[in-house]
């Protein structure tokens, strides 16, 4: 399979190169040149399949030419063996029509493990036997950092430098990163905000001196392999609820449009999806874009669902490219307009095309807490604030009565114990394997939020690429 940039000018790459590249050289994002399709019979054959078997069937067409089916299976077995639940992504029924798809049984308790555990193995496979050395630099407001660190700790050929805003991630989130003492992991607390950290990372990627000396790589949600791994659980869940004969709706708490774009890919591949509900918190750029056709940045408001506190949704570009007929030049012009004006209009084709599959909702703090309370009181399920946003939107969505609605449960409630306790009266406990998190040794450095300080610190420690 070959991968093209959404903006049309960057080189066409194979699967491995597209995975390592992250952002394309023209500023676009990589997408497969065509969407593979599974027939109804092939989807029906996934009934009763294990998570790994489903993963191999769904992902194999995307890695043709780079990995054999057996190699792909080996990577999936390794990635999902680290999950705490035998089903990997269990479905839990809430009432006659609402379900939770629990995606938080991985090592760091957020759905990002589903993709990053696989990505860790993929990186190592690509690098083993070469003298290449990869330098991963990332900024995190919490969940991405811990998931990437866990996935890459101790792997050969990769060094990780993860920036987080000092004092602005939760204690659980910080400790999940800083107690990983593997020599290839470096945590940097930046004296600034998440936006400052992100801006530093962007500048390092654009810096000629750094990027010629080191093979820089990103693990944020624009990475194609991450999206690909997320397509799997849409199939796995829908088949268990009656697909391909019955269409299923999904409600997805989203910020960067990554998780819900994976649902769009599943639909393109032939999975019957009745609706994809894009659930945002009050940082509602996606809800405004989908409901009015006007994509416009706002100011970020801090909420109890911090992994969705985002005002520019990187992966939205992939949807705009698809619905705009893959016209790279037109998309590049549209995105340039957005960069300068901080706002743009969707074309009629983009707005109308999105409306056919997506619905959207903006969930405020009261509605979120209401959904968390309902899940606890009525179904005995303690859910985290991100999942609460998704469930609130799911329960308000207007859908035919016979369509099952699956809310993606993206984080374990114990990651956000204060918000969960406020909404439900229950204080969730960390799973026992993390019970000693607060006794473990931490290691990180605190640096001022300047390019010189951070890039200098990294350059002294990173391994030059071959
Ligand atoms: C990252 C994250 C999200 C948002 O996912 P996107 O792919 O950015 O839409 C939602 N919930 C949790 C818990 C997350 O960590």
Image (cartoon, grey):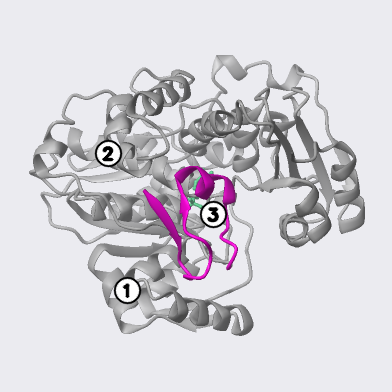
Q: Which mark is residue 40?
A: none
**Secondary structure of the residue carrying numbered label 2:** strand
- Residue 275 spot, x, y in % from top left: 24, 57
Q: Are marks 2 and 3 in contact (CB under 8 Å)?
A: no
Task: Tell how many labels.
Answer: 3
Q: Are marks 1 and 2 in contact (CB under 8 Å)?
A: no
> Of discs 2 and 3, which sits in the foreground?
3
**Secondary structure of the residue carrying numbered label 3:** helix
Residue marked by disc 3? 308
Find the distance from the CA under tag 3 to the CA under tag 1.
28 Å
**Could you tell whether 255 is left or right of 175 in the image?**
left
Which sits earlier in the primary sequence, circle 1 or circle 2? 2
* Residue 134 picture quarter: top right
* Residue 33 picture quarter: bottom left
Q: Is residue 373 visible in the rendered structure shown here?
A: no
Find the distance from the CA under tag 1 to the CA under tag 2.
34 Å
Which sits earlier in the primary sequence, circle 3 or circle 1? 3
**Could you tell whether 52 is left or right of 123 in the image?**
left
- Residue 341 spot, x, y in % from top left: 60, 85
- Residue 360 spot, x, y in % from top left: 35, 64
Find the distance from the CA under tag 2 to the CA under tag 3.
21 Å
Figure quadrant of the C terminus: top right
Kindly identify the residue that appears in the image at 86 percent across and 51 percent down: 455
Q: Are marks 3 and 1 in contact (CB under 8 Å)?
A: no
Relative vertical location of residue 295 with respect to residue 464 in this rendering, above or below: below
Residue marked by disc 2? 99
**Could you tell whether 396 is left or right of 71 in the image?**
left
Residue segment shown in magenta: 1-26
Which sits earlier in the primary sequence, circle 2 or circle 3? 2
> Is ligand 1 within 8 Å of the beta carbon of the residue shown at mark 3?
yes
Residue marked by disc 1? 325
């Amino acid at each position: 399979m070959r991968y093209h940039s959404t903006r049309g000018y960057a080189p066409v790459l194979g699967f491995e190169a597209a995975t390592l590249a992250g952002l394309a050289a023209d500023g676009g994002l990589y997408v497969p040149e065509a969407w593979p399709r599974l027939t109804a019979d092939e989807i029906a054959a996934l009934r009763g399949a294990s998570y790994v078997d489903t993963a191999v069937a769904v992902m194999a067409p995307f890695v043709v030419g780079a990995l054999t089916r057996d190699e792909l299976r080996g990577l999936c077995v390794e990635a999902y063996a680290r999950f705490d639940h035998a089903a990997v992504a269990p479905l839990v029924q809430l009432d006659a029509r609402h379900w939770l798809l629990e995606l938080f049984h991985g090592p760091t308790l957020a759905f990002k493990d589903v993709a990053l555990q696989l990505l860790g193995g993929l990186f190592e496979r690509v690098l083993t036997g070469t003298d290449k050395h990869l330098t991963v630099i990332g900024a995190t407001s919490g969940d991405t950092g811990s998931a990437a660190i866990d996935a890459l700790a101790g792997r050969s050929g990769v060094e990780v430098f993860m920036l987080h805003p000092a004092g602005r991630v939760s204690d659980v989130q910080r400790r999940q990163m800083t107690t990983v003492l593997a020599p290839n992991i470096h945590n940097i607390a930046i004296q600034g905000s998440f936006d400052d950290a992100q801006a530093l990372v962007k500048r390092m990627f654009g810096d000629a001196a750094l990027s010629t000396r080191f093979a820089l790589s990103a693990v944020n949600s624009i990475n194609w392999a991450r999206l690909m791994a997320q397509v799997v659980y849409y199939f796995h869940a829908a088949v268990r609820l009656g697909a391909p004969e019955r269409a299923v709706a999904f409600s997805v708490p989203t910020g960067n449009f990554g998780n819900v774009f994976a649902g769009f890919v599943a639909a393109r591949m032939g999975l019957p999806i009745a609706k994809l509900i894009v659930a945002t918190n009050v940082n509602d750029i996606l809800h405004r874009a989908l409901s009015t056709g006007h994509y416009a940045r706002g100011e970020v408001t801090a909420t109890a669902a911090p992994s969705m506190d985002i005002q520019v949704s990187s992966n939205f570009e992939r949807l705009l490219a698809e619905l705009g007929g893959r016209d790279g030049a037109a998309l590049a012009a549209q995105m340039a307009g957005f960069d300068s004006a901080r706002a743009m209009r969707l074309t009629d084709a983009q707005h109308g095309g999105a409306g056919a599959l997506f619905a959207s909702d903006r969930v405020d703090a009261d509605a979120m807490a209401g959904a968390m309370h309902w899940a606890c009181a009525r179904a005995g399920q303690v859910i985290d604030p991100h999942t609460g946003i998704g469930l609130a939107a799911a329960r308000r969505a207007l859908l035919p009565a016979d369509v099952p609605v699956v809310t993606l449960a993206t984080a374990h409630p114990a990651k956000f114990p204060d918000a969960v306790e406020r909404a439900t009266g229950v204080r969730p406990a960390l799973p026992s394997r993390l019970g000693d998190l607060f006794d473990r040794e931490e290691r990180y450095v605190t640096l001022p939020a300047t390019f010189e300080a951070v890039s200098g610190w990294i350059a002294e420690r990173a391994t030059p690429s071959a």
